[in-house]
Image (spheres, helix red, strand yellow):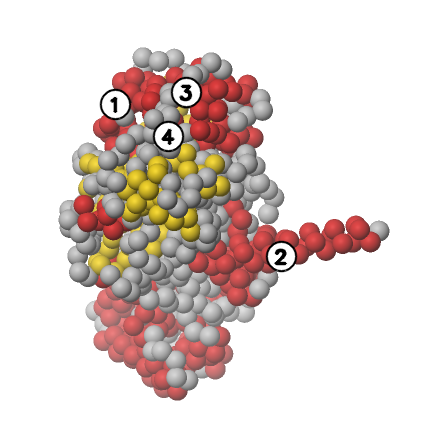
Amino acid sequence: MRKLGGVRAPHRKGTADSAPRPIPIPPEIRLPMSMHIGAPAKPIVKAGDTVQVGQLIGEAAGFVSSPVHASVSGKVKRVDEYDAVTGLGAASVVIESDGEQTPYDGLRAPELSDMKSFLDAVRDSGVVGLGGAGFPTAVKLTVKDVSAVDYILINGAECEPYITSDTRTMLDETEMLEEGALLLQKYLGVKSIVFGVESNKPGPIKKLTEFASRRDGIEVRTLPALYPQGGEKVLIYQITGRRVPEGKLPLDIGVIVLNCTTLTAIVKYIRTGMPLVSKCVTVDGSAVINPGNVVAPIGAPLAALFDFCGGLKDDVKKVLMGGPMMGIAVPDTDMPVLKATNAALAFSEKDALLPAETPCIRCGRCVSHCPMGLAPLEFERTYRLKKPELLEKYKVNLCMECGCCAYSCPAKRMLVQYVKLSKIMLREYQAAQKAAAEKKEAAV
Amino acid sequence: MNGLTVSVSPHIRDGATTRRIMLDVLIALVPAAVASVVIFGARAALVIAFCAAACVLLEAAYERALGRGITAGDLSACVTGVLLAFNLPVSIPLWQAFVGCVAAIILVKQLFGGLGKNFANPAITARIVMFLAFSVTMTKWTGGGGLFGETYDAVTGATPLTMIAQGNTGALPEITDMLLGVRGGCLGETSVLALALGGAYLVARRVITWHTPAAFILTVLAFTALLGREPVYQMFSGGLFLGAIFMATDYVTTPQTAAGRLIFGLGAGLITVVIRVYGSYPEGVSYSILLMNILTPYINRLTVKKAFGGARA
Ligand code: SF4
Ligand code: SF4
């Protein structure tokens, strides 16, 4: 078996024991229509409309899309056509909350009878990949031939430092995970459900094993605490030994991966009819006064989460949505919590300092740590040489931007930056190639 | 709240820096430096200090003249200086050592764009330049004194490799002396034990991997055994340990993957033996490393790791 690279990033899971507490409902929330991969949802409310918690406000626009529901009760203040705050480039609905959190009276638990009704329920729940990817879950589960699916893997690796929201899901909502696994077995007909959890989470492993040992086809696998075990391809390989070939999906090798919180969100909808409207978010980092886990309505500004956790220290210099390895640094704390947001981290000046870049010394650390077996040092050089055909050869498209390379680089090269730039260059090149080929074909 | 830093992920980095790596290399060189002073006398310390200082100052002066940032803080010039000194006889006139430093820092390193850009190992190349320019002083194994002065005097005339080349195997020192380094040779290359200690430190600190040194040294051992040419002496003599552990593992000029490093070590070992046995020089480590430096880009291309799940590269 090939040993995949990775890094022993610090764990810093200090909030693992902090049971999530709900934050006070903020006076105003913002729900972007594009919190998922695929077509943005279509807003179906307008300024002045009254909405209640769980009410549909954005319709899924097509197959690869996801509906959006009001996370607070109150009045629609406006629908921004171009969303400058989130930069997501689609509309967003701003709701002024009335603080009542009145549930929508049209909520009904879905009736399940077969695979189709189950998938419809998943679609209507508004659930997307909550591990961070945000891919619509219903699309992932819609499989032409279920008999070709050998495993559904439930991702509880939570390999990013600081984040403990999935840990809390596994500890606090264990029975929902059990129910979810049974639902998957029943309605999708997939026999084998495997939970993958990093070894640094003995609590969740114990709780999951308790029910798994009583059930047929449900298994818990302990993964090494080596970032990025939670990366989809890494997780699949560690648990099943299968490799996702270039340009293919996990489904093509008979595997589906769901994040554990994704699964509980589906179960919540199936139990109560309440779609995905709130998230457990880990609030941590050196600039947070009282770090802890919180439950926040989707669309709440990050500032509301930080305020609830005692506020930010004066020397705050960097705010992240997501973990320190792959999270996005945001320009201000107005940014709303998205469906896939699992952490809001704030760091003081000394942790936000950018290390000085020195010349690459060709030490090969980036190569040996890359889980995908790539040569990150070549991306920067090749990008600067403007050689997209070489980038293709170096397989920059296989990079999952996990950051292991830059993390371990002694010269502190911003390798992920060059990966992103290289991917754009390669995409443009490939599009141009394709266009040229088509033109030639048309001419013939 | 204003002025949050927006930067690309990852937002945390591990503690490794270029400076720390170079510092580890310097630490690993300490045992051999101490051995050289014990074996060859105080002048060894003078040569080492002189070369290190000259390399650092030359680099700073060059960067200053070109208006570039001074990079002396990364300690790489210091490493080059010490390694160059290790490759010189203790009796080398300092002005000649200075010429070597100029060759290493200016010619090989800076003219190619500084750290990370040179294709050949600066210390190795400088040694070869000096060998060609100052062939008399570069092969004069006398002078110094040191703790083992008398024992050492017995072998002043020739290095073990010269003895083997001349068929004078009867005069070879004891194996224990070979291990300790009490023999003729460049000042930092003789104490195999001290060098191996440094190498172990570097492997333990994960600064280098075992691949190149092991492949290099074992290839020399196996190949000379095959040829029936005093394999054990071949292994312990000349600059083999110094070259295999400290020069053939130079990041910039050697391959990045384990497979590439094995190929590098194997190739360098073979070339070393060919030069030693069939060439007119008794020693071939420097040339073999330089040749493999030149081949490194090709080795890198040959040994690109197969991407995980990737189609044929
Ligand atoms: S880890 Fe950094 S210094 Fe080392 S080869 Fe990669 S890019 Fe260069
Ligand atoms: S090249 Fe991509 S996949 Fe490899 S370590 Fe860097 S970010 Fe991760």
- In the image: residue A226, left or right of residue B298: left
Image quadrant where residue B9 sits: bottom left
Q: In which chain is the residue bearing label 1?
A: A
Residue holding disc 2? A429
The label number, if any, that marks residue A275 in the structure image: 4
Residue holding disc 1? A207
Residue found 19% across the figure and 61% down from its top:
A315
For the residues tagged 2 and 3, is the chain the same?
Answer: yes
The 10 Å Cα crowd at callout 1, few under 14, some 14 to 19, many 20 or more, is some
Q: In which chain is the residue bearing label 2?
A: A
Q: Position of residue B281 (x, y in %)?
A: 51, 69
For the residues tagged 1 and 2, is the chain the same?
Answer: yes
Foreground residue among A183 and A107? A107
The first of marks 1 and 3 along the sequence is 3
Distance from label 2 to label 3 (Cα)? 47 Å
Q: Position of residue A379 (x, y in %)?
A: 50, 58
The reply to whether the C-beta atoms of the residues labelled 2 and 3 are less than 8 Å apart is no
Residue found 27% across the figure and 76% down from its top:
B49
The first of marks 2 and 4 along the sequence is 4
Q: Which numbered mark, 2 or 3, is in the foreground of this view?
A: 3
Extreme right residue here? A444
Q: Is residue B61 visible?
A: yes
Residue B282's place in the image compared with A402, above or below, is below
The first of marks 2 and 3 along the sequence is 3
The 10 Å Cα crowd at callout 3, few under 14, some 14 to 19, many 20 or more, is some
Residue A115's place in the image compared with B268, above or below, is above
The first of marks 1 and 2 along the sequence is 1
